[in-house]
Structures are given as structure tokens and as C-alpha cells.
Image (cartoon, grey):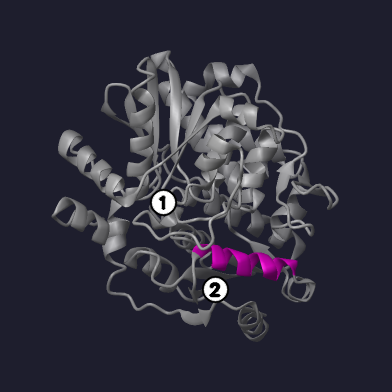
Amino acid sequence: MQLYSTNKISVNVGFEEAIFRGLPPDNGLYMPLSIPKLPQLFWDNVENLSLQEIAFEICNVLIGDDIPTEDLKSLVDQAINFEAPPVVQIKENIYCLELFHGSSMAFKDFGARFMAAVMSYFLKKSQKSINILVATSGDTGGAVAQGFFEKDNISVTILYPEGKVSNIQEKQLTTLGKNIKALEIDGTFDDCQALVKKAFLDENLRDRFNLASANSINIARLIPQSFYYVAAYAALKKLGKKYVFSVPSGNFGNLTAGILAIKMGMPATTFIAATNINNVVPEYLESGIYSPISPSKSTISNAMDVGNPSNFPRLKALFGGNLSEMKKQLIGCFFDDDQTREGIKELYESYSYLTCPHSAIAYLGLKEYLNENQDTVGVFLSTAHYAKFLPEMESTLGFSPDIPDRLASLLNKTKVAVSMANDFEDFKSYLNQNLI
């Protein structure tokens, strides 16, 4: 697999170099030089395949030249060791794809666990070690912490915005210890993301500490997110209808992975980019002007509080930079906190279904679309378990929903994090003193 930079200045690299480098030197994002299609036989038989079989076939056509077949099968089975995400019917023509059944109870388990397995595989072969830097607006931190915990030769430093992640999300990334460290930044998620990007572009830091990224800017995070779109299509195929995915969107890695699945041969569908009031991409789809929001605006759907989505260059690249082509497949919409709360209440009161604020935004976007496209089956993505957002759920519904044991057990654990100003020199000093 050869990858190019979306800025088209840096030289092309192989898969192994791309996942450890994270960002190209020209500050673009790595993308496959070509995206192969899965054979028609795969799509004809996809409904009979397990999630692990789907994942292997996708990986095999993309990175099969980089990892031997038996090793690749083993890595997929090691990383994707949970059942296919259920496609739950809410009402006629509306389904929810529940992506919170992994170890950290968020969709990012797919990407984080796969990336951890692949990195460990290459590090074992090369007998090297790495330091991973990752910014989180909520669920990435927990998924990365779980996925990389106690992995040999890997140290992880997670940056998160002070006061802008939920209590349970914070506990997931600040209570493991060992090879997982957390920095609480006085700023927004975009500030955390900018600090990480600056560190990767600092040659002295990168060369001294062998830095790597676990954010969705890393191609190894993006690829496995395509698995569940194909699994959802497999579950819906028997209905024989047109279908649409509504994706709660922040950094846009999730939606980009869905477009990747289309490029690999999944029957064409419409995607709804449903955001909160950080509506950079919906505005772009409407006006053709890309205007990042700085600083990003705080909402109850905190994991989507992104004012300058990192994966937007990839999204553009998948459509050849052509806005008209993008608009044929992608529709944008956005909702404020009051509308989000109404979505949560409607799902519970009308259908006895509990869902988090992010997923409620996806539901609202889907509902709006289906009002004018009633012959379509709609799937909204539920990206995290509702119990990770208890204050919002309690204030919206008037009661406290049940908390799964694996999340409840976190509440009495002690947070361990280093508070830090939004200052690159302070961050660089910390890295120089604490990384090995």
C-alpha cells in the first residue's frame, strides 16, 4: 500500500511508515494512492460473513501487501474481538447502528484496537519503541487508553481540554496509569489537536522520541472504521431498499471512513453529516466556503466540538476536490443543544430508546432527511453509550439512567492528570522531561 499526502508535497510512503509517522512532513494527511474495490463476489455474499471476515477482506485488499495473510488474520481477530454492532430498529425505516459495544463503549474502539495491534506487530519485528501523542474531545482518549494499555514498547500521552469532557470520559483516560499519561489542557479540543500537530512537525522532538499519533489523522485509525459500515449494509441488504447513513460528525474521520467503504465498492448511498453548532462542513456544503471556527463552541455533544475538522482534507480528496461531486453523496445539517435535548427526549418517550447527545443529533438529521425521502431506509450511528454523558441525560430526561458496571466502576477511581497551559513551549518542555 502506497500513501500520498493530501498537500501533495511530501514523498509517497508505505503503510508502516505512514502509521508511525502519523503526519507527512508537509502537514497534510496520508491517503491511499489508489483505493482498490472489493470483488463483486464479496458483495454478493457479504450478508453471510462475520464482522471479522468483513474486516479481514477490507484489510487484505488495502494492506495485504504489507502484512502476510496469516498474520493479518491474527491481527484482525485480536483487535476486533467483539460481535458485529447491532442494527436496532427504532421504527419503520429508522434503524440505529450501535457502535458502543467495545471495551471503552465508543465507536473509536474499532480504530484504536486495530491500530494498537498493527503498531505492536511492526514494533515487535523491528524491536523499536514509540511515544504516541493523541488529542481527544471525549471518546478517543478512552478508546486509545484501553487499546494501548500495557502494550510493549508503546507509551501514550493523551491531551484533553479541561472541563470539556464528561466525568466518565475523563476517568477512562486518567485512571489506567502505567504506559498511559494524561495532560489536562487549558483550552479547547482544537488547541489540544494543534499542540499535537506542532509536536509532529518539530524535527527534534520527532527524531528524539520516535513520535506517533493515534488520532483519526492516522491512517490506521481510519481504515477499521469502514468495517462497521459494510457490516451494517450486510444487515440491511435483505430489505432491498435505498439506504442512508446519518453520522454524528466532529473531526469527520467516521464519515470519511464511510466514503472509503463506498470507494471500495459498497453500493452507493447518501451520507448525512450531522453536526452541532460547530457546523463548518454543513456550511461548506451550502456555500462552498470553508471557514473554520476558532475557538470551537462548547455544547452538550462535546466530542463533536471541533471547529477545524482534521479529516476534512481527506474528505475532499475522496471527491477529487470537487464540491459538486461531494454534494451528490453528502448532505449537511446541524442542531443546537435545545434541539439535541428534544431528540433525546423524543427517542425515549416515543420509542423507549436511550441515546447520547451525539447520537441524538444523528437521529435528528436522519428524521429531517426521511421527511422528504420516505422510500429510504435510514441508519443513524450511535457512537457512544449514553451513560458516558450522565449530567446531560439526567437534566434532559429527569431521571438517572442505569450505568453499565464497566463504566460505574470508574467513578470511584482517582484521576491522575497534569494540568497545562495552552502553550507549545510548555508542552515541548514536558515531553523533553517525561518521554524516554
The quadrant of the image that shows the C terminus is bottom right
Please give the range of residues in magenta. Answer: 189-201
Say which residue label 2 marks.
179
Task: Please tell me which of labels 2 and 1 falls first in the chain.
Answer: 1
Residue at 70%, 38% (x, y): give it. Answer: 317
Give 112 or 358, whichever is nearer the viewer.
358
Q: CA distance from mark 2 to mark 1?
A: 21 Å
Q: Quadrant of residue 166?
A: bottom left
Q: Residue furthest left?
A: 398
Q: Is residue 191 magenta?
A: yes
Please say whether residue 206 is one of the residues in the magenta stretch: no
Task: Using residue 418 as the reference point, say whether residue 133 is left or right of it.
Answer: right
The image quarter containing residue 126 is bottom right
From the viewer's perspective, tell me whether residue 423 is left or right of residue 93.
right
In the image, residue 213 lies at what x, y percent?
64, 61
19 versus 52 height, above or below: below
Query: Which label lies toward us, 2 or 1?
Result: 1
Residue 115: x %, y % from top left? 60, 53
Give the total of numbered labels.
2
Residue lying at 61% horizontally and 83% vertically, measured from the top left: 426
Under circle 1, the secondary element is: loop
Q: Main secondary structure of the magenta part?
A: helix
